[in-house]
Amino acid sequence: MPLLEIRELTKSYREPDGSPLPILDIPHFDVASGEQVVLRGRSGCGKTTFLHSVAGLASVSSGTIKIAGVEINRLSEIGRDRFRAQNIGYVFQTFNLLPGFSALENVLLGMAFTGQGVDRDRAHHLLERVGLAHRLAHHPAALSVGEQQRVAVARALANKPVLLLADEPTANIDPAHQQQVIDLLREVCAAEDVAMLLVTHAPEVSDQFERVEYLEQLNRVAAA
Amino acid sequence: MNLFQIAWRNLSQRPLASTLTGLSMALGVASIVCVIVIHGVAVERFEQDAQGYHFIVGEKGSALQLVLSTVYHLDKPLPPISYDYYRELKTGKYAEFVDAVVPYCLGDSYDANGTLFRVVGTTPELFERLKYDGETNYKFSSGENFKSDHFYEAVVGSVVASQGKLKVGDTFNPTHGLQAEGDKHQEFKVVGVLAPTGTANDRALFVNMEGFFLLEGHALAPKESATETNSIESGEPLGPTVGYDNEGKTVDPLPENQREVTAMLVLAKNATMSMALSTTIMKGDDRAIQAVAPGSVVTQLLDKFFAPVRAILLVLTSLIVLVAAIGILVSIYNSMSERKHDIAVMRALGASRWTVQAIVLLESVMLALLGGLAGIFLGHLMVGLANPFVEPLTGISLDMFAFNPLELVLIVSVMALATVAGFVPAWTAYNTDVAKALGAMR
């Protein structure tokens, strides 16, 4: 059984005149457990909306999204929040570390909403694993761009998720550090047996993955 | 990392805004604390001062004026009454009901380095038979009580001693009248300094009544006295038949028919006798005197004057706290637009709408709680700092550690107010559109 299973997913926004504006119409999409998939697509084809829908941050109009057998779009909003906290890691394009929190606290923050308490040892271990054992108490402003992204990766993996969603994680990083981030994501996900769905528009990134999907092909709206 | 730590981190991120908002709350709470503590202490002291005897006898007139002038050494004394009323209570027909009666002769004052204090002519029984708060005996920090046959001896209250730098062995000259520019009387010698009592008596000088009678302008003409008191019984002298001045020379006391007293503090043998005796005095047809239980007058005074003033002050200070709570609302609300990013990230990490709302509410409550606790500390500190200035003027000692249970109610109220104030920004957090906020970061 696939880890992520999407069937007949549609998502529409409403135009100012009340008419529906279709964004997504994806009949079928699967990701296996531990699989690493790149999703490419031109700007505005619905990549971020798709990730938000998979993460349960945005509701869908119809269809099903199953993660580890749980149909998340049938869960209540609080249920989706809890499921996301426990099962999905999210790496943002702009890292989105909270500026008032240290590197360690940013990782602990990722554990704060699971309802299961925080595991400081794991937070330490993850930061050690991404090479930041010596920067635990540093706030984001005191970290380099590459270090910030590594903290973001550690935070996304804090709760031992089954699926990691990465939204253009290298877009704001200079070419010298891009490869480090990709290597880190791939390595850590492989080690933790976490499936990864990585959105990018950079061919030099997507070329490194065995499976690359194009949203224009998956999404009937974009194809049209 | 729990919600409290997250809320605290959020507050720490805006140190200036958080400090100023907390400070405004602290000042509001401090002003309420000052009102509560000062009012509480003042009421306690007012009630305490009026204890130790059952009623005061004085000329018919304003009961409040009689109490203020006798108990608190404030206001103008009522006109004096015949000395024979003192005799009636001391050895006469009412003596069987009375445990102690202490006469007060008022009308003189003493200027102690710019502060005017009242001089009270009385008997040593004031400090021997009466207890100043109903249960505590008077004590002397130095010296002793004056003797009844040493006409020009005096005891001074602790505040007077401190303000006037008077000590045992010193002398002072009372001023005739209640204004500093009156004529100076013959000098009295300080033989005792009272230990602080926390009552108005700390702000008075007590001289031997026998000497007081002999001061210029204090004696009645014999004829006048005889006319006034022809219906009142007479008998053996109540005071010493011979006395001494401060050089040991003998002094004749003023004849009793030339004497008057301003008031008398009466301690009856029990409450029932007190009631019966005061009723008898009040109902006497030919009487020119009244018997006033100071407690009831003080209660009226507190209800009619202090309670409304306190209510007004509490309303005003509560407005300060309300403004501070609005300050919290504005401070957190203004930060919401820049924090949509953080809220969206927390939502993406799995925080529910309720959780982010709770974090914002916690920030508001924590600001109010810290501001409130700082306010309580500040309020008590202000009370403590004010004490050295207030005590010499009023005799009321403000204890900076005098906590009032209302302060706990205040803290709870402030937190409730902060919860209401925090609800507006919390609602904004609740309704943050995560997808939009995350998209706006792109």
Image: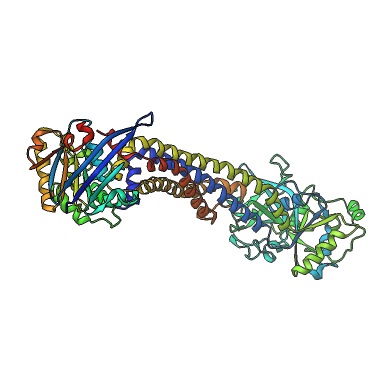
Q: Look at 44% across and 46% down and name the residue there.
A: B368
Question: Percent x, y for residue A60?
Answer: 30, 42
| Nearest to the observer: residue B263 or residue B362 | B362
Question: Percent x, y for residue A18?
Answer: 38, 31
| Nearest to the observer: residue B50 or residue B154 | B50
| Nearest to the observer: residue A140 or residue B59 | A140
Q: In the drawing, does residue A124 fall left or right of residue B103? A: left
Which quadrant of the rendered structure holds the C terminus of chain A? top left
Which quadrant of the rendered structure holds the N terminus of chain A? bottom left
Residue B72 visible in image: yes
Question: Percent x, y for residue A125?
Answer: 16, 53
Q: In the drawing, does residue A59 fall left or right of residue B98? A: left
Q: In the drawing, does residue B408 fall left or right of residue A178? A: right
Question: Percent x, y for residue A17?
Answer: 38, 28
| Nearest to the observer: residue B321 or residue A185 | A185
* Corner quadrant of residue B88: bottom right
